[in-house]
Every structure is written in C-alpha cells, then in structure tokens.
Amino acid sequence: MVSQEQLLSTAKPDVVSGEDFILSALSTDLQSWALFLDIDGTLLDLAETPDAITVPPSLPADLDALSKKLDGALALVTGRSLDYADQLFSLSHFPIAGLHGAERRDPDGQLHKATATAEFERLKADLVADTASWAGVFIEDKGAAVAAHYRLAPDRKDDVELVMERALIRAGPNWTVQQGKMVIEIRPASADKGKAISAFLAKPPFAGRRPIAIGDDVTDEAMFRAANRLGGYSIRIGPHLPASEALGSTRSAEALRGIIAALAS
Ligand SMILES: O=P(O)(O)OC[C@H]1O[C@H](O[C@H]2O[C@H](CO)[C@@H](O)[C@H](O)[C@H]2O)[C@H](O)[C@@H](O)[C@@H]1O
Ligand SMILES: [Mg+2]
C-alpha cells in the first residue's frame, strides 16, 4: 500500500525538489556553484511591518560558514537598501545587491550606489503626507526607492496603488513600479535582480560558477530567469506556482534555514 507520504510526494513533486537539489548540489560540488539569496520571505520569515523582522541568532554565522565553504561565492540580493541589509547580517559584509539590484557591493568591495534626486526626495515626503491618515499604511524610505506597505490595511490596496501610480508618473522614466507581498514600491528602473546576479557572475569568486537563485516574490522572477538562462537553478520559497519561472520549491524560509545550517556545519 502506498503511504500518505509517498502520495504527497507524487502529487506535489516540486514542493521539495528545490530542497533536494540544493542539498545534493552543494554537498557534493561546492566549487561549481554560486548562491544568491533573497532576504525577506526567504532567509527571514515575513513580519507585519518592515522593522518587525527577526534574524534567528544562528543564521549570520551559518551564512558566514557557508560563504567560506563556497570561497565567498554567496551574495544577498534584496529589495532592502544595502545599508539596512548590512545591519541585519553585520557579522560579514557579504557581496550584496540592494533596492532590487539598483545598488551593489561587489566581492572586491566596489560600491555601486543609487541616488535620489531632489524631486524624488520631495515625492517621498509627499507620499508620507498623503497617506498619513491611512491607518496601517506605512511608507518605507529606502533612499533611491520607496515602498508603500499595506499588510496591516489590506482594504487600502486600491488607494495605495493609485497613489503610487501617480507618484511614478511624477518620478519619471528613471523609476519603475515593483509589486511585492502587500507592498507597492517605486525603484530605479536601471537594474533588477537578474542584472545584479549577472554582474556578480562577471567577477571572481562568482565567475565560472553556476548560479542557484533563491527567492519568494515577484521581484525574484528576474533572478530566476537569469539563473535558468546561465545554466543554474532557481528555487522559490513556498508552494509551487505555475506562474513562477523557478525550477524548484522549498516548503518555507525555516526549511531553507535548516538546509543552510546543515551545509554550513
Ligand atoms: O527582496 P527582499 O529581500 O525579499 O525584500 C522585499 C521587500 O521586503 C520587505 O517587505 C516585505 O517584508 C516585510 C517584513 O517581513 C513585510 O512586512 C512586507 O509586507 C513585505 O512586503 C521590505 O520592507 C521591502 O523594502 C523589500 O523590498
Ligand atoms: Mg523576498
């Protein structure tokens, strides 16, 4: 008789295939792969507000140990600002792409920063003022990008979309809209997470390795596509979505952290 576990794995083969893939690839052949990790929803569990996230105490050291095993070919690729992400993982200054790829610190320390124009600064201030009376809506100022969060006010989604559409017109062609989980952002149009991982892969210690990109959201689709195109692998956190271009899935951020801890030890 077929066990319930076997049935489940037959019905949803994609749910754990990403976990099997990363474990077997990185356990056997660390020199061939480079790892690109999203932060929110991937390394960290989602929280009700941007600042309410917690970094599990063992995670920075596990990432550091895994990075060393990969000869430094591990980068964080996030929608957060580079400075904010650095504070989260202050143990190591990993190569990192922030603002969905618009800012980057290369493995050799070279910095590529995005700057806000004076008009963009005024636009952010006006967004704060325009949404001040909307309980549960938060404007996150990320320098050259801005996010409007409505996780605590889902009924405000349409209002948030409208105010951000207007803000985008005002920001002009150098900025674009980024959809996310209970958030709408305006970010520099010059880059995305796919371009960021391609830029990392042009330099040692990433050059010559195959990318594994792991993320959970719409913004990560650009790096999934890039990883697939470059002969690598892509993993989405959460149940398999037909609309996603990720080749595999993992059950949760917690499951991924367990894999990272196992590979780091
Ligand atoms: O690319 P990521 O590293 O995943 O960053 C994407 C955005 O993450 C943050 O917002 C999301 O996480 C919050 C904390 O869990 C949550 O409250 C919010 O609803 C999510 O959208 C972050 O605040 C954004 O700046 C990032 O772009
Ligand atoms: Mg994410």
Image (cartoon, rainbow, N blue to C red):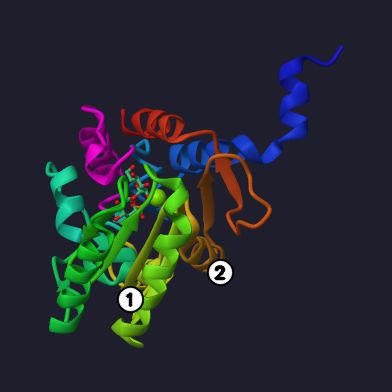
Q: In terms of depth relative to the viewer, which is nearer, 185 or 109?
A: 185
Q: Contact (CB < 8 A) between labels 1 and 2? A: no
Give the residue pinned by disc 1.
167
Residue 140 lies in the magenta stretch: no
The residue shown at (34%, 70%) is 186
Tally the marks: 2
Q: In front of the other: label 1 or label 2?
A: 1
User: Does the closest atom of ligand 1 sit within 8 Å of the Cβ of label 2?
Assistant: no
Residue 55 lies in the magenta stretch: yes
The outermost residue toward the right is: 1
Q: Is residue 192 left or right of residue 65?
A: right
Amino acid on which the number 2 mark rests in the picture:
Arg
Secondary structure of residue under mark 2: helix
Q: Which mark is residue 112?
A: none
Q: Quadrant of residue 96?
A: bottom left
The outermost residue toward the front is: 133
Would residue 160 be visible to someone looking at this image? yes
Sequence-earlier tag: 1 or 2? 1
Q: In terms of depth relative to the viewer, which is nearer, 190 or 158?
A: 158
Question: Marks 1 and 2, Cα distance to the nearest angstrom?
Answer: 34 Å
Q: In this picture, which residue range is highlighted in magenta?
A: 48-74
Q: Quadrant of residue 192?
A: bottom left
Give the residue pinned by disc 2.
229
